[in-house]
Image (cartoon, grey):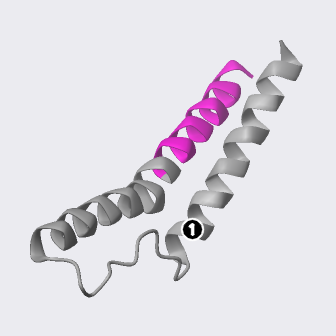
Amino acid sequence: MFIKSTLKNITLFAVLVMCLWVGWSDFEFVRPDLTQDEIRESIRFYIRHGIQYAIQYLIPLIILAYFGRTLLNRIVKT
């Protein structure tokens, strides 16, 4: 049980670090080609920004909330 919980926490921490690195670096997922028409470009724009916001804000916040809840549960149990 302890090993499973520790492995889950290590995995979540690694995902958190990767999300922060990808979200806050100058990394771009899709580089729209300048010859694409307006509709395809706008679709790529919204998909790219949706993924970027999820990686930059949503996933790290969920992981931090999980760690905070876990820490709070440990403090309350003690």
Residue located farthest toward the top when viewing the structure as drawn: 1
Residue located farthest toward the front when viewing the structure as drawn: 35
Q: Residue at x 11, y 68 (%)?
A: 39
* Along the line of sight, the residue nearer the viewer: 52 or 57: 52
Q: Magenta span covers which residues?
A: 61-78
Image quadrant assignment for residue 30:
bottom left
Q: Residue at x 27, y 87 (%)?
A: 34
Magenta portion: prevailing SS class: helix
* The N terminus, quarter of image: top right
Q: Is residue 77 magenta?
A: yes
Image quadrant assignment for residue 21:
bottom right
Side (left or right) of 21 relative to 27: right
Q: Position of residue 27 (x, y in %)?
A: 53, 77
> Disc 1 designates what residue?
22
* Along the line of sight, the residue nearer the viewer: 36 or 53: 36
Side (left or right) of 9 relative to 48: right
Side (left or right) of 33 relative to 21: left
Q: Is residue 64 magenta?
A: yes
Residue located farthest toward the bottom when viewing the structure as drawn: 34
Q: Position of residue 78 (x, y in %)?
A: 75, 22
Q: Position of residue 29 (x, y in %)?
A: 46, 68
Residue 33 position (above or below residue 29) = below
